[in-house]
Amino acid sequence: MRVIRVGTRKSQLARIQTDSVVATLKALYPGLQFEIIAMSTTGDKILDTALSKIGEKSLFTKELELALERNEVDLVVHSLKDLPTVLPPGFTIGAICKRESPYDAVVFHPKFVGKTLETLPEKSVVGTSSLRRAAQLQRKFPHLEFKSIRGNLNTRLRKLDELQEFSAIILAAAGLQRMGWQNRVGQILHPEECMYAVGQGALGVEVRAKDQDILDLVGVLHDPETLLRCIAERAFLRHLEGGCSVPVAVHTAMKDGQLYLTGGVWSLNGADSMQETMQATIHVPAQHEDGPEDDPQLVGITARNIPRRAQLAAESLGISLATLLLNKGAKNILDVARQLNDAH
């Protein structure tokens, strides 16, 4: 029986995510055996530094990609938001699974259960490892203070509950759902309060770009709507040259053949910001509508079973929105944010 080796991070959430993908693949391919190989990444090891300060784009992916390169694993399951918009040569995202909630969630310290960010006492400290969240929420809730908190979900919840340092922490709703911790969610942040990270809530399966066998194997996992939304989001981020060290956020929706993309950039303290919305007509395809392409990668993604037309329209939407913001002065906001982040 052929064994397919699947790489993942060691954290409990990463294992749950990987197990869910492997369960789907097992159901689709009962004749194959799957072996999960867990490893620690740079991002898992450096826990005393804010993510935006480490200056490494592939914090949670590098070690896993090395294993792929050395043929030690055949595919790797990631949170899509951890994958840079430009992948190292030789790799591609062979599948993007159906997205769960892309929103951010607030988890409150037990003594503040029933509160919202708005009703927390003056100068309450809110923990988040994300510049994107801090910039938007500082602007919206100036009475709060935002402080970096690192570690996997278990560690961060423990810090919230056991230390008296934080009144609340912000986490991705999808992660809390996957861990079965929905009961800890005190507030869901909607886009008007806090837009989400590019790819948030979706899982990506990274493979070797030339490994046609494995690409065919995982390609069936693509969810067409999630794929097109994430292509638009990743194209927007790539064109802005955003990353972990600058606050960039998005919101996408698909309705009646229209893909809507809202994107924004913020200064580190949230005082300066710029956001716009654009839409494009995109025919959400049924699978297998037209034939394979020679070089199908777009923003690091290969999806041969989704019409190229739809993918290009989504990519073009992301680039157009980024261009609009850059023309209006977004580069200046991002440059200053980058410099300030590097200086602190």
Image (tube, rainbow, N blue to C red):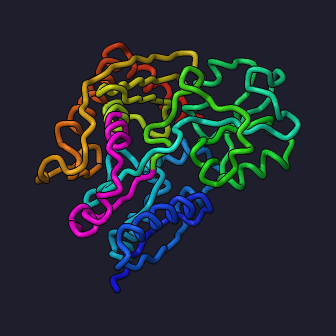
Q: Total label count?
A: 0
Name the outermost residue toward the top: 328
- Please tell me which residue is depicted at 56% across the width and 64% down the height of the picture: 15
- Please tell me which residue is depicted at 38% across the width and 73% down the height of the picture: 73
- Residue 155 x/y as whole percent: 72, 54
Q: In the picture provided, is 224 more to the left or to the right than 172?
A: left
- Please tell me which residue is depicted at 52% across the width and 28% down the height of the picture: 195
- What stretch of residues is rendered in magenta? 203-232
Q: Is residue 225 magenta?
A: yes
Quadrant placement of the N terminus? bottom left
- Residue 166 x/y as whole percent: 79, 38
Tell me, yes or no, if residue 63 can be seen here.
Answer: no
- Please tell me which residue is depicted at 53% across the width and 64% down the height of the picture: 9
Q: In the picture provided, is 173 more to the left or to the right than 29?
A: right
Residue toward you, 332 or 115: 115
Tell me, yes or no, if residue 221 can be seen here.
Answer: yes
- Residue 119 x/y as whole percent: 79, 21
Q: Is residue 236 magenta?
A: no
Q: In the picture provided, is 45 more to the left or to the right than 274?
A: right
Residue toward you, 45 or 105: 105
Q: In the picture provided, is 292 more to the left or to the right than 90?
A: left
| Res 283 → quadrant | top left
- Residue 321 x/y as whole percent: 32, 23
Name the outermost residue toward the bottom: 1
| Res 236 → quadrant | top left
Quadrant placement of the C terminus? top right
